[in-house]
Amino acid sequence: MSKDQLIGALLLVGSIIGIIVYGYLLYLYPQIILQITAFVVIAGVLGVVGWIGYTLATTPPPKPIEEIEKEVEGELKKVEAEASDQQKQGGSQQN
């Protein structure tokens, strides 16, 4: 059995045990278990929303497409000029 298969099997067994334990606790203490479950779900969703907000607030905006196009055109002209210079040098060396 490979490492990935072992991890997958452990995750499967762990999740089945978790479901059984959760069901048992829900049967014994329904009120508190439902409250904890609701809190964890809401906290998780709001945590993800907060993380997305933080990422949006701290990530610099991308360059405008016009600026990128100008950079690409400048690089293309530079490459074309170098290629034509090499052709001129190659042609003069053959003579």
Image (cartoon, helix red, strand yellow):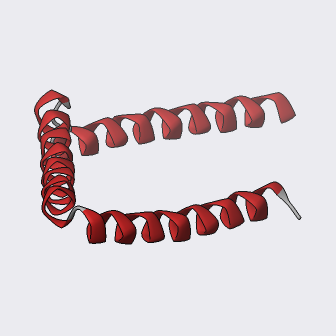
Vertical placement of residue 68 versus 27, above or below = above
Q: For residue 10, what is the image quadrant?
A: bottom right
Provide residue 9's location: percent of width, then percent of height: 70, 66
Quarter of the image for residue 94 reads top right
Q: Residue furthest right?
A: 1
Q: Residue at 12% x, 57% y: name it.
A: 35
Residue at image point 36% right, 72% down = 23
Quarter of the figure with the C terminus: top right
Left or right of residue 47, residue 11 in this image: right
Q: In the shown orientation, is residue 77 left or right of residue 28?
A: right
Q: Is residue 2 above or below residue 69?
A: below
Q: Quadrant of residue 25?
A: bottom left
Residue 12 at least partly seen: yes
From the top left corner, tell me how far across and down residue 16 is, in percent. Answer: 54, 71
Residue name at image x 35 percent, y 35 percent: 74
| Residue 21 rendering spot, x and y as whole percentages | 44, 64
Instruction: State the residue in front, 51 or 76.
Output: 51
